Amino acid sequence: MNLWEIIAIVTASVIGMELFAWYAHKYIMHGWGWGWHRDHHEPHDNVLEKNDLFAVVFGTIVFFMFLIGFYVSAALWWTAFGITLYGIIYTVVHDGLVHQRYFKWVPKRGYAKRLVQAHKLHHATVGKEGGVSFGFVFAADPAKLKAELKRQRESGEAVVRDSAGA
């Protein structure tokens, strides 16, 4: 494989993972996987969450992609690399920046602030129904997300916490 093919595969994998993460978050984690994801939406003092089991499952799949890719397909190996790169970005942004699991820094402006605001609005609903901002790296305008939460609350689609500003 040449360098441009590798860059294309890794870039497509990272972008594809954001799309997959949105889908998995909305339809799996807030669907049939809510039993694992619920504690992520509830206050607790635990270092680990049941929600972290998703990382174990996805990490195991990627491990086998690396293994098979090593012996069978360079494209599969580089896809696994792109997925791993996304996992690192996710860990730093979601767990580190948004949920402050690894470091304490609250951004005051820019895209980092928008990411934090969007994810806080995601956590504004009580339970798995409704909600906004299911992605992890790309964040919509917080004003639009607030308007959507307000619409969901008024329609009875979601229970929204009062502090959400919706």
Image (cartoon, helix red, strand yellow):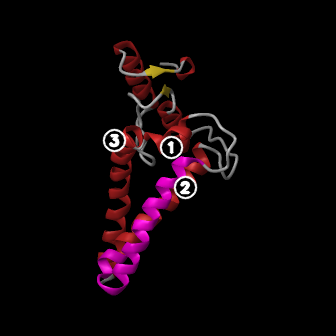
Q: Quadrant of the N terminus?
A: bottom left
Q: Amino acid at mark 3?
A: Tyr
Q: Is residue 88 above or below residue 144?
A: below
The prevailing secondary structure element of the residues shown in magenta is: helix
What residue is disc 2 on?
A: 91
Give left or right: position of 34 versus 47: left
User: Gap between marks 1 and 2, in whole Å?
Assistant: 17 Å
Q: Earlier in the sequence, mark 1 or mark 2?
A: 2
Q: Residue 70 or 148: which is nearer the viewer? A: 70
What residue is disc 3 on?
A: 27
Q: Amino acid at mark 2?
A: Thr
Q: Is residue 141 above or below residue 159?
A: below
What residue is disc 1 on?
A: 111
Which residue is at the far top? 154
Magenta segment, which residues?
49-77
User: Gap between marks 2 and 3, in whole Å?
Assistant: 21 Å
User: Gap between marks 3 and 1, in whole Å?
Assistant: 26 Å
